[in-house]
Amino acid sequence: MDVLEWLAAALGEEAVTAGVLSTDPELLEAARADKSGWAADGLPLAIVSARTVEHVQTTLRAASEFRVPVVPRGAGTGLAGGANGTDGSIVLDVSGMNRILEIDAEDQLAVVEPGVINSDLNAALEPYGLFFAPDPASRAVSTVGGNIATNAGGLLCAKYGVTREAVLGLEVVLADGRLLSTGHRTVKGVTGYDLTALFVGSEGTLGVIVGATVRLQPIPPGEPVTLGALFPDVRTAAEASARVTAARLRPAVMELLDAPALERIAAHLGRETLEEAFGASDGAAYLLVQFDGATAAADAEAAGTLIAETGGTVRVAADAAEGERLLALRRAFHPALAASGEVLIEDVAVPRSRMPEMFAAIERISTRYGIPIPTVAHAGDGNLHPNFVYTGDEVPAVVWDAANDLFRTAIELGGTLTGEHGVGVLKRRWLADEVGPDSYELQVKLKSVFDPLGILNPGKVFGGR
Ligand SMILES: Cc1cc2nc3c(=O)[nH]c(=O)nc-3n(C[C@H](O)[C@H](O)[C@H](O)COP(=O)(O)OP(=O)(O)OC[C@H]3O[C@@H](n4cnc5c(N)ncnc54)[C@H](O)[C@@H]3O)c2cc1C
């Protein structure tokens, strides 16, 4: 009996007839890729579209029995190649486990299955006056399980924290099929090692998340106040954002767009759209800042003064609707790039005070390699997304050379290779450079404790040396 026969028998006829186990070539082909621009060689063996925890457990038992790799997958929107079905693997798709099991408004938590779409959870929470804070730009399509597995961040995380801060407990199926519960429903809890935090950001290499208890936050009162500022150059804009942070103002959103990014948006939406929104078009960088909560107006005024002193031409949005239109321009950035080719979205982060140096380095690297690098930054947390647009199926070698320079610069500035997208396949060759040999070795050993047979997403995160 081979692994597929074993799996079919263990899942049962009803599940197999319902399509839980599939070897459809079109589905297998689609499962080789995610949104990172990288597709695995070869083809996965099968896809399990799990509907229940038992389906996940059965799949991992089969994989252990036959030593077959398993690639956990949510919505496949990852940008590091982590969910890509490798040759001969079983892709374990949990996006169909998408029920919200509980909303507890009193304790401000929700219990969800891993396949719940981030924005569906927030839509369900709104009537309770609560929200789930992690807000990746992919929130309309990515799953809460995927957000947890990648420790996703977003526009709001400088103020409200990344996904790690929003996870209280997890249900995880281990490599041998056992079901493990971690964490608490309590706000506090320090019994034993924090396994919940370990699974957050583990990119499917330690276990398969089949349930999560997530922390919710009250929707801030009142209307947010938004302001935008044009700058003559990006370094000054980065200095202004660093000054806002240093002044201990806490914007909910602080986004910075450089000149190539503004060019792309103008080409996509029309220059007049930007002129109307900004009140001018003669800027080489744009800083967008939004405050929420009871002190929003006073905070915005203080930030506006600082930004103007630093050299920005400030314009405060008249109302929340105008603020939303400004945010929509920021959100148009990725569609604008995608309209002109394939996009490699990079994801370095540096201490916020070092952002001016990182932007200067991006300009130098762009000139050195002769390629435009339109960049946006979540300036409130120092996370920059330098982007490369290319044509064809493969990321060109010159783009990787430029990206290599970017990564090394970010590390030299005291930063990191990845602020929120993860290591996956695309960054594994730089992992040891950042964490150092001792940490790397410990992490490899840690994985082998959870996954002694090496069946959980092998080749992802580790193995790049
Ligand atoms: C247009 C666009 C914008 C984006 N913007 C952001 C952004 O602002 N911030 C950000 O952080 N990311 C962003 N991303 C990246 C991506 O959306 C996030 O990483 C997201 O969290 C992935 O969720 P997913 O459900 O698509 O996971 P997948 O892509 O399916 O999987 C991602 C990784 O998690 C693992 N995994 C998935 N589900 C589970 C599970 N249940 N148990 C164990 N492992 C699992 C996979 O093996 C893989 O390693 C963006 C992507 C796109 C395409």
Image: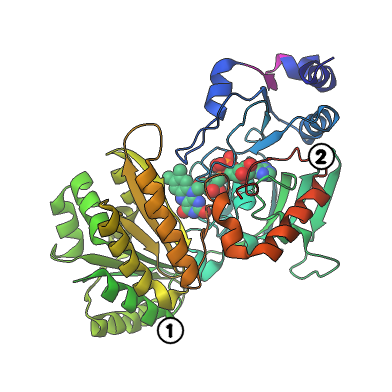
Could you tell whether 109 is left or right of 382 in the image?
Answer: right
Residue 136 appears in view: no
Picture coordinates of residue 455 (x, y %)?
75, 37
333 or 235: which is nearer to us?
A: 235
Query: How many angstroms separate mark 1 from mark 2 (CA)?
Result: 48 Å
- Asked if the stretch drawn in magenta spans residue 19, the answer is yes
As drawn, the label of residue 453 is: 2
N-terminal-most mark, 1 or 2: 1
Q: Residue at x 13, y 65 (%)?
A: 282
- Determine crowd level at label 2: few under 14, some 14-19, many 20+ residues with C-alpha closer than 10 A: some
Residue flagged by tag 2: what amino acid is it? Leu
- In which quadrant of the rendered view does residue 260 lie? bottom left
Could you tell whether 147 is left or right of 177 in the image?
Answer: left
Q: Secondary structure at mark 1?
A: helix
Q: Residue at x 58, y 24 (%)?
A: 42
- Asked if the stretch drawn in magenta spans residue 309, the answer is no
Picture coordinates of residue 319 (x, y %)?
29, 66
Mark 2 CB lies closer than 8 A to ligand 1: no
- Quadrant of the drawing holding the N terminus: top right
Q: Residue at x 46, y 72 (%)?
A: 413
As drawn, the label of residue 63 is: none
Picture coordinates of residue 116 (x, y %)?
61, 42
Residue flagged by tag 1: what amino acid is it? Ala
Residues shaded magenta = 17-23
Q: Nearer the viewer, mark 1 or mark 2?
A: 2
Q: Which residue is mark 1?
A: 246
Colouring scheme, one of rainbow, by chain, secondary structure, one colour: rainbow
Number of numbered discs present? Answer: 2
